[in-house]
Amino acid sequence: MNSNILKLKLKRVDPVKYAIITTVLTLTIMLIFVLPFFLIFSAIGIGAGSESIGAGAALIGGGIIGMIFGIIVYGVIIFVVTLIATSLLNFVLKKTGGLDIDFEKVGFDFEAQSNQGRIEQ
């Protein structure tokens, strides 16, 4: 067996922390890729309510309010779905005995750290 391989077993993932991380990453990607389209569609008058309030008003209020509301709703949905998925993952990990993960030892002395109690065994 290769002595540079460290075998670890994933037994549990913190659902709340993982849901927060997933939500922040997904919303960041959404802002980068979707925000420009919201602004463009608001400027040219495409979108919800643009027929009744006009393109200029949609740019000032309709599009921005829609973006803020959409981001909040989307964030809550992502958080809840990820929380449920991570809880299911933990259930499956518990029933199957965990997930074996192989790491390569590179430039870090795992054994010295484990002696100090930083890495659980």
Image (cartoon, rainbow, N blue to C red):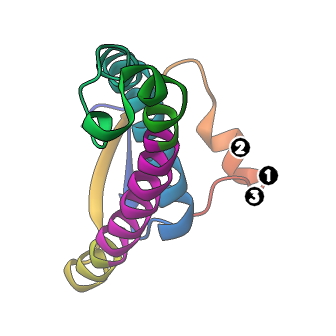
Q: Amino acid at mark 1?
A: Gln
> Residue at 39% of width from left, 53% of height from top?
74
Q: Amino acid at mark 3?
A: Gly
State the SS at label 1: loop
Observer able to see residue 55: yes
Residue 67 lies left or right of residue 82; in this view the side is right
The CA distance from mark 1 to mark 3 is: 4 Å
Q: Is residue 83 magenta?
A: yes
Nearest the eye: 98 or 22: 22
Tell me where the magenta segment starts and ends, as one range: 66-87
Report the residue marked by disc 3: 117
Disc 1 to disc 2: CB gap under 8 Å: yes
Residue 34 at x, y = what percent? 33, 25
Residue 60 at x, y = what percent? 54, 26
Report the residue marked by disc 2: 113
Q: Quadrant of residue 37?
A: top left
Q: Which mark is residue 116?
A: 1
The CA distance from mark 3 to mark 2 is: 7 Å
Disc 1 to disc 3: CB gap under 8 Å: yes
Q: Amino acid at mark 2?
A: Gln
State the SS at label 3: loop
Q: Is disc 3 surrounded by few (<14), some (14 to 19) or many (20+) residues within 10 Å?
A: few
> Residue at 50% of width from left, 20% of height from top?
106
Q: Quadrant of the C terminus?
A: bottom right
Number of disc labels: 3
Residue 51 at x, y = what percent? 25, 35
Q: Quadrant of residue 11?
A: bottom left
> Residue at 29% of width from left, 22% of height from top?
45
Disc 3 to disc 2: CB gap under 8 Å: no
Observer able to see residue 105: no
Q: Name the main secondary structure of what is drawn in magenta.
A: helix
Q: Quadrant of residue 85?
A: bottom left
